[in-house]
Image (cartoon, rainbow, N blue to C red):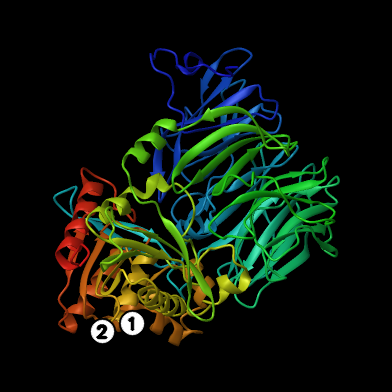
């Protein structure tokens, strides 16, 4: 049945409906909040305009008429649905839906002060964007406030959109430098003076990574990471008395990741928590006072993500892949920790599965994909996984893909002695195993991701296209990548980013050359973007006899120049780990370049600054190393903005490969 028609979303005086970027429902499902006309803030479109549709009256109401257009962020209904709170120009507002009156409740936002949202580094590295929460009774709003004073300002330069250069200031804490000071406050939803939690520790050397109300209470739970990010202190704060209790502390010898798998159970007597303390990422049931902790999921496997917690049924549903880290399947375990994990996803469907589950865990929107199957979306009943309705079959995409006659990715394991690494390979069309072929390696290799996964990825048509020229395409995940292979796998790279992974990778490439006679060890190329760009450079500079040609895009040349939260999480500070920073930074090994190198970067990259490109260029020139380069004026980290950019990027890469890494078998 149709819940909302497009006609209901046509504003008065207009002829076309609102373009929906996102939406949410009031708690009673009687009102729809629509986010539209969005604009980019750093990496994502998080500001724009909001409208409310009342399903009973049919009234479509624009919010924020008293604030600047497209300035609204993170609007959300009050618990009773009578009001909407939002951020505009770094302050928080509350709007009454019956009268249309909007009340500004914070006033110091602007300049160095940010209310209800975050600075660049919190957004990028802690996934913090929406920075305020309604209390369950709607009388208060708890929010983060960020003070960027004292944080170093990096200036990007726009030289292309006006006669004179325009500097773009960006408060950006680089490894070892001062962070913004962040605190959590509480304010009446009617306005007034905020009050602040007095959380122990220097606010510039601790991170308030998560905060939310405990359901049905006047208490918030706050997660506080220390600067090294190896200790997470869990605080419960009362918003009436502003008292704090440290109920639990999680720690690790290396680093911790923030997880959002908290759900309250048994009338808020217990909550769920994820931890790697037994060597695997598992779910625990923790008492409200933090004194009792029981393991729910058991076994030598990682819980990749939580899909649903069903207290009434007594199960938690989660994604895992105990037997093959390239796949993803739905499992369930009893909340009391008894019994073994049960696989719910069908055994016959090898690949990656994801689920949007109903709160009672009886229904789910199921998405299945693998390297040769585009996402197939259906409605299934659970736990029997019976398909009730096919929603999106993508039959045409699958048919068109199959007609191309491409060689699919082949998954392999590469034994490097200490460990086996996961990898995939694409062979050229008309492949002849009696010949030797050049190899183009696609690499990421850092802790934020993994490239060896059994998913669709658009059919990976770029790499398929390059294989048509006569290249074998290869990708290998070294240790330290975000793969569900246990704590030790992921954390072996602590204080050694760019070192362990490149050694693993080089050992794996040598083993591939030894194992597969059709791989030409004299024609090995490598390319990567962002962390993969840094890996490309480190591989070429540290093992120049192996990697003959490379393309590095949007890379970090010197790890000291990346942000505090990411770099220090995995490397500690430059002061505490000077050797690690030096050895892991490609700029310090540029003198070793022997092969063909193309470097590419956007001058408007707010994530990995163009500074990296210039510093490496200087170092290569100093050592009289010849190389190719391509700059993209005012493009950001993805190098996609402005006319024809993406095509130009790919054609530049293609021509470089063809001219510098001889294609075809021989």
For label 2, count other residues whose C-alpha is less than 10 Å away and answer few (under 14), some (14-19) or many (20+).
some
Whichever of labels 1 and 2 marks the residue nearer the N terminus, that label is 1
Q: Residue shown at 71%/61% (left/top)?
A: 282
Residue named by callout 2: 592
Q: Residue shown at 26%/54% (left/top)?
A: 430
Residue named by callout 1: 542
Residue 568 visible somewhere in the drawing: yes
Residues at circles 1 and 2 in contact by the CB criterion of under 8 Å = yes
| Structural distance between the alpha carbons of marks 1 and 2 | 7 Å
Could you say which is closer to the camera, residue 127 or residue 111? 127
Q: Percent position (x, y) of residue 207? A: 59, 64
Note whether 567 is above or below 322 in the view shown.
below
The number of numbered discs placed on residues in the rendered structure image is 2
Q: Percent position (x, y) of residue 229? A: 59, 70
Residue furthest bottom as drawn? 579
- For the N terminus, the quadrant is top right
């Amino acid at each position: 049945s149709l819940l909302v028609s497009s006609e209901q979303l046509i504003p008065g005086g207009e002829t076309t409906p609102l373009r929906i970027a996102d939406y949410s429902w009031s708690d009673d499902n009687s009102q729809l909040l629509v986010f539209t006309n969005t604009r980019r803030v750093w990496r994502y479109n998080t500001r724009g305009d909001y409208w409310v549709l009342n399903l009973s009256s049919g009234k479509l109401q624009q919010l924020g008429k008293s604030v600047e257009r497209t300035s609204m962020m993170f609007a959300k209904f009050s618990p009773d649905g009578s009001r909407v709170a939002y951020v505009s120009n770094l302050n928080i507002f509350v709007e009454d839906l019956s009268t249309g009156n909007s009340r500004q409740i914070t006033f110091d936002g602007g300049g160095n002060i940010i209310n209800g949202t975050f600075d660049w580094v919190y957004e990028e590295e802690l996934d913090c964007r929406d920075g305020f929460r309604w209390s369950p009774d709607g009388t208060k709003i708890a929010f983060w406030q960020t003070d960027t004073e004292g944080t170093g300002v990096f200036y990007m330069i726009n030289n292309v959109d006006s006669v004179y250069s325009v500097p773009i200031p960006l408060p950006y804490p680089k490894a070892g430098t001062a962070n913004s000071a962040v605190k959590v406050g509480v304010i009446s939803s009617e306005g007034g003076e905020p009050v602040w939690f007095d959380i122990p520790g220097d606010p510039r050397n601790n991170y308030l990574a998560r905060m939310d109300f405990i359901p049905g209470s006047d208490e918030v739970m706050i997660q506080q990471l220390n600067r090294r990010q190896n200790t997470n202190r869990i605080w419960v704060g009362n918003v009436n008395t502003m008292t704090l209790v440290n109920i639990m502390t999680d720690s690790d010898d290396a680093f911790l990741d923030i997880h959002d798998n908290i759900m309250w159970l048994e009338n808020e007597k217990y909550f769920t928590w994820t931890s790697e303390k037994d060597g695997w990422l598992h779910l625990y049931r923790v008492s409200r006072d933090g004194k009792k902790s029981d393991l729910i999921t058991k076994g030598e496997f990682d819980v990749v993500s939580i899909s649903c917690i069903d207290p009434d049924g007594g199960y938690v549903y989660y994604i895992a892949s105990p037997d093959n880290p390239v796949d993803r399947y739905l499992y369930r375990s009893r909340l009391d920790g008894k019994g073994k994990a049960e696989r719910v996803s069908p055994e016959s469907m090898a690949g990656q599965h994801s689920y949007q589950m109903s709160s009672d865990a009886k229904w789910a929107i199921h998405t299945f994909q693998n390297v040769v199957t585009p996402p197939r979306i259906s409605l299934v009943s659970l736990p029997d996984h019976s398909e009730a309705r096919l929603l999106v079959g993508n039959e045409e995409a699958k048919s068109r893909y199959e007609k191309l006659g491409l060689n699919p990715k082949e998954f392999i394991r590469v034994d490097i002695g200490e460990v086996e690494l996961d990898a995939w390979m694409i062979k050229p069309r008309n492949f002849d195993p009696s010949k030797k072929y050049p190899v183009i390696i696609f690499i990421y290799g850092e802790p934020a991701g993994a490239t060896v996964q059994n998913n669709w990825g658009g059919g990976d048509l770029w790499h398929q296209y390059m294989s048509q020229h006569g290249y074998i395409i290869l990708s290998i995940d070294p240790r330290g990548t975000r793969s569900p292979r246990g704590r030790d796998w992921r954390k072996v790279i602590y204080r050694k980013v760019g070192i362990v992974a490149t050694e693993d990778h080089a050992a794996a490439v040598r083993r591939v050359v030894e194992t597969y006679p059709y791989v030409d060890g004299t024609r090995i190329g490598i390319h990567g973007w962002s962390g993969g760009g840094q890996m490309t450079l480190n591989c070429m500079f540290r093992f120049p006899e192996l990697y003959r040609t490379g393309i590095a895009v949007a890379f970090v040349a010197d790890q000291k120049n990346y942000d505090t939260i990411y770099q220090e999480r995995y490397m500690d500070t430059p002061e505490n780990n000077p050797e690690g920073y030096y050895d892991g930074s490609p700029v310090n090994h540029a003198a070793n370049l022997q092969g063909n190198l193309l470097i590419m970067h956007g001058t408007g990259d707010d994530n990995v600054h163009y500074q990296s490109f210039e510093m490496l260029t200087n170092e290569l020139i100093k050592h009289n190393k010849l190389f190719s380069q391509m700059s993209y004026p005012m493009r950001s980290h993805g190098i996609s903005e402005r006319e024809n950019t993406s095509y130009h990027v790919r054609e530049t890469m293609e021509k470089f490969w063809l001219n510098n890494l001889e294609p075809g078998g021989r």
